[in-house]
Amino acid sequence: MTESSHDENIELMTYSEIVEVKGFVGNFDVTIRKKPRYVDLSKCTGCGLCTEKCPTKVPSEWNLDMGLRKSIYKPFGQAVPNVPVIDKEHCLFFTKGRCKICQKLCPAGAVDFEQQEELVTKKFGAIIVATGFTQFDPSVYGEYGAGKFKDVITGLHLERMLDTSGPTGGHVVRPSDQREPKNIVFVQCVGSRDESKGRPYCSRICCMYTAKQAILLKDHYPETQSYIFYIDIRAAGKNYEEFVKRAQQEYGAIYIRGRVSKIYEKGDKLIVRGVDTLAGKQVEIEADLVVLATAVVPQPDAIELAKILNIPYDQYGFYSEAHPKLQPVESVTKGIFLTGSCQFPKDIPDSVATTGAASVRTCGILSKDELILDPKVAFVNSDICSGCLNCVEVCPFNAIESTVVDGKTVAQVIPTLCHGCGNCASTCRTSAANVQGFTDDQIYAQVASVFEILKKENLLELSE
Amino acid sequence: MSYLNSQDIHQFRNRILSISGEDASKCIQCGKCSAGCPISPEMDVQPNQVLRLIQINDPDALLRCSTIWICASCQTCSVRCPEEIDIAKIMDSIRKLALEAKGPLGEENVVKFDEIFLDSIRKRGRVHELELVMKYNLALRQPFKDAHLGPVMFARGKLGFLGHKIKELGKIKEIFQNSKRLLKP
């Protein structure tokens, strides 16, 4: 990340969001809102004194509320750029007009409470979307007690605890009493492979990260015993199967095939009631800590962003690829590419691979002066067009715009956005909109000649 | 050993589908039903195994098992099933098929009890406990089973000599007639 912030060919705009995208492949006009961090990027040296002296403490989102952060803060240690941001909702100056300690102490005079947001519009040839994923909220499973029982956590909580720069300094403890757990139960497929309360798909990454977590736990805490409830083990990658086997054979993780039905508290322990379908019996485990492998879902604003970018998405909010096998990194909208888990759950090797692919496809556009398009696109005959603009409404790709020709308002197709679906042609009342090679007249002519042939071969049966 | 595919492998699954409307093919054998079933430790065939035997067309074990008769119909399985299969309903369908098959039943006594119980309700609108106990004991050929509990229960008003009949008995008879009609395949 640091390398990309220093590369002369990359302009990194952090704490910014896309507001509007106009135009088409090769000529996108993108309006970006640069949100105010109230710290001057050009002056801040990243010394961290402001964060150290800030008096307010707020639950840290990065650490999933397991630790605290200040109102002037960097979300995590390796954040790029190495510059903090002020949280307006909790900063004493913004909420009560007091304090300003950070500004007083900053040796570079970088704190600027007057900073405003900036809107910039720039031209881009292509867009790559890599907005990632978030976790499914497991509290919908009342039977598991997530959100209710303190010691029922998610895999991401465990990751934060295992991180030496995390909220517990790398110590895995029970959130309820900070004691080290001895028996840990992992529950896979929480929210995944579930038609009723969750998502029907498999989230792909959880089997592997759970095995990893079981290995790390045993490695750091040899007295622990991990139990993993699974339905299937998805380990389809290079060395993946061997990795899971190691967790079982070398690190003693017990894999139990069966879904968990209920988790309840008994004293200061948790009882996990599941089943071993291979042994054919119900099982109960007395656990100190329960880790739920929650489903991978798109970001909460994924659909909002899709509408701004004008790219289609599926029923879960994952962005749609142009072809599931042959065009996995291209969105349906030309010039916009997809990588990572915003398209579908992926692990790191897959994310790296799709990013490389998307980048090269982008070069394919940016390296040329002209683009070759499929000729089967729509066009509007402006002489016949009545300017009703119904075609603009029905175009699923926002590929028709209104324009003025000889003082008359007419519709005009943007060929680079058009996919030749023909919605406009079938909607147009005056037959002004047509798809090249498939105009109404051409289709009538085809039908007429088919009837000619049928008549000649006496194959035509007309009803009375 | 007969081959799994000596008959149409979908036969029993289709049968259960037409009776109950539930499709056992949807089951991925996750086991959550068995995991949550309060009676599971006492069952000879686990709930998920019941679904499995339907999937591989092996009805014989199902028609003879204890499971379907000790199932409490609590619906914990149905409510928690991720594929939204109404497993309790499938249990009911197998009970129907087991009775129709007229072969040996996994829990003959449970069936006898259920029949005497329902018969009492059909005749009176409410169960007459004394009649139920006496008829059940007779059916089991154990006339003095639990007899020591009798005096205490009488004393506490739990066991009346005469049964009660409800006012609108006709409605109860209607329910029984309707259920007979609905059970026709």
Image: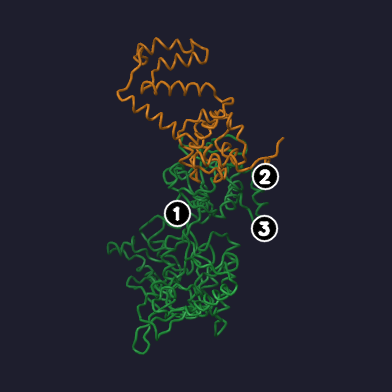
Chain colours: A green, B orange
Chain label for disc 3: A
Q: Label 1 sits on what residue type?
A: Leu
Above or below, B90 relative to B28: above
User: Is disc 3 placed on a helix, strand or loop?
Assistant: loop
Q: Nearer the viewer, mark 1 or mark 3?
A: 3
Q: What residue sits 51% from the left and 28% below the top?
A: B70
Q: CA distance from mark 2 to mark 1?
A: 32 Å
Q: Label 2 sits on what residue type?
A: Gln
Image x and y of residue A166, in percent: 49, 55
Chain label for disc 2: A
Is residue A415 among the parts visible in the rendering? yes
**Dot 3: few (<14), some (14–19), or many (≥20) neighbours within 10 Å?**
few
* Nearer to us in this view, A203 or B100: B100
| Labels 2, 1: one chain | yes
Q: CA distance from mark 1 to mark 3?
A: 31 Å
Q: Which residue is mark 2?
A: A249
Chain label for disc 1: A
Find out whether the residues at labels 2 and 1 contact each other: C-beta distance under 8 Å: no
